[in-house]
Image (cartoon, helix red, strand yellow):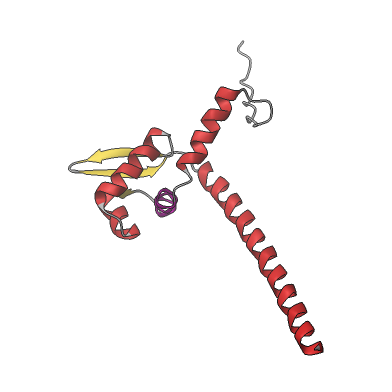
C-alpha cells in the first residue's frame, strides 16, 4: 500500500543558501518594473493578447512583448498561440497575494507619513499663532 503524499512545506527565506537567495532576488527584480506590474494587474481580469495589453497600458506592442517575454521566462505568465495572436494569462495567482501584501504595507507607510505631516502642520500653526 502506498503512503499518502505529505503536503510540501512552504519554503521560507530564513536559512536559504546564497544560490536560493539569488533566485528570490531575481523574482523580486522582475516585479520591480512598474510596466510589468501594470501588465500583471491587467491580466488579473483574464487572459489578453499583446495588442489588448499594449492599448490598455498605453505602451507599444514591442515594449509589452519584451516585458511579457521576461514575465514568461520567470514563470509569472504563460502564453498560448491562437492563429496569429498570442494570449497571455497568469501562471501563478500567488503573485497577487504578494503584490497585495506589499501594496497594503506601502499604503500603511504613506498613511503614517501623512499623519506625521498633519501633526507637524498643527504644531507649526500653533507655534505661529503663539507669536
User: Which image quadrant is residue 114 in?
Assistant: bottom right
Please determine whether, in this image, residue 109 is positioned above or below residue 84. Answer: below
Q: Image check: 94 left or right of 129?
A: left
Q: Image check: 69 left or right of 123?
A: left
Q: Is residue 35 magenta?
A: yes
Query: Which corner quadrant holds the C terminus?
Result: bottom right
Residue 127 vs residue 66, the one in the foreground: 127
Q: Image check: 107 left or right of 120?
A: left
Q: Residue at x 74, y 83 (%)?
A: 125
Give the percent coordinates (x, y) of residue 62. Answer: 25, 47
Q: Image check: 96 left or right of 112?
A: left
Q: Residue at x 62, y 19 (%)?
A: 4
Q: Which residues are magenta?
A: 34-44
Give the percent coordinates (x, y) of residue 38. Answer: 42, 54
Query: Which corner quadrant holds the N terminus?
Result: top right
Residue found at the far right of this picture: 130
Give the percent coordinates (x, y) of residue 67. Answer: 35, 44
Please determine whether, in this image, residue 44 is positioned above or below residue 27. Answer: below
Residue found at the far left of this picture: 84
Residue 53 vs residue 85, the one in the foreground: 53
Please determine whether, in this image, residue 6 is positioned above or below residue 38. Answer: above
Residue found at the far front of this picture: 131
User: Which image quadrant is residue 111 in?
Assistant: bottom right
Please determine whether, in this image, residue 55 is positioned above or below residue 20. Answer: below
- The total number of labels drawn is 0
Residue 61 vs residue 96, the one in the foreground: 61
Residue 10 vs residue 130, the one in the foreground: 130
Give the percent coordinates (x, y) of residue 8. Answer: 62, 26
Q: Residue at x 62, y 22 (%)?
A: 17
Q: Is residue 103 magenta?
A: no
Amino acid at each position: 500500500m502506498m503512503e499518502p503524499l505529505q503536503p510540501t512545506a512552504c519554503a521560507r527565506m530564513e536559512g536559504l543558501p546564497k544560490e536560493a537567495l539569488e533566485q528570490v532576488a531575481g523574482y523580486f527584480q522582475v516585479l520591480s518594473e512598474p510596466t510589468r506590474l501594470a501588465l500583471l494587474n491587467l491580466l488579473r481580469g483574464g487572459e489578453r493578447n499583446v495588442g489588448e495589453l499594449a492599448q490598455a497600458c498605453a505602451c507599444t506592442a514591442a515594449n509589452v512583448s519584451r516585458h511579457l517575454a521576461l514575465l514568461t521566462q520567470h514563470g509569472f505568465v504563460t502564453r498560448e498561440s491562437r492563429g496569429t495572436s498570442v494570449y497571455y494569462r497568469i501562471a501563478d495567482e500567488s503573485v497577487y497575494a504578494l503584490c497585495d501584501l506589499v501594496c497594503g504595507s506601502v499604503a500603511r507607510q504613506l498613511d503614517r507619513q501623512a499623519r506625521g505631516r498633519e501633526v507637524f502642520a498643527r504644531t507649526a500653526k500653533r507655534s505661529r499663532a503663539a507669536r
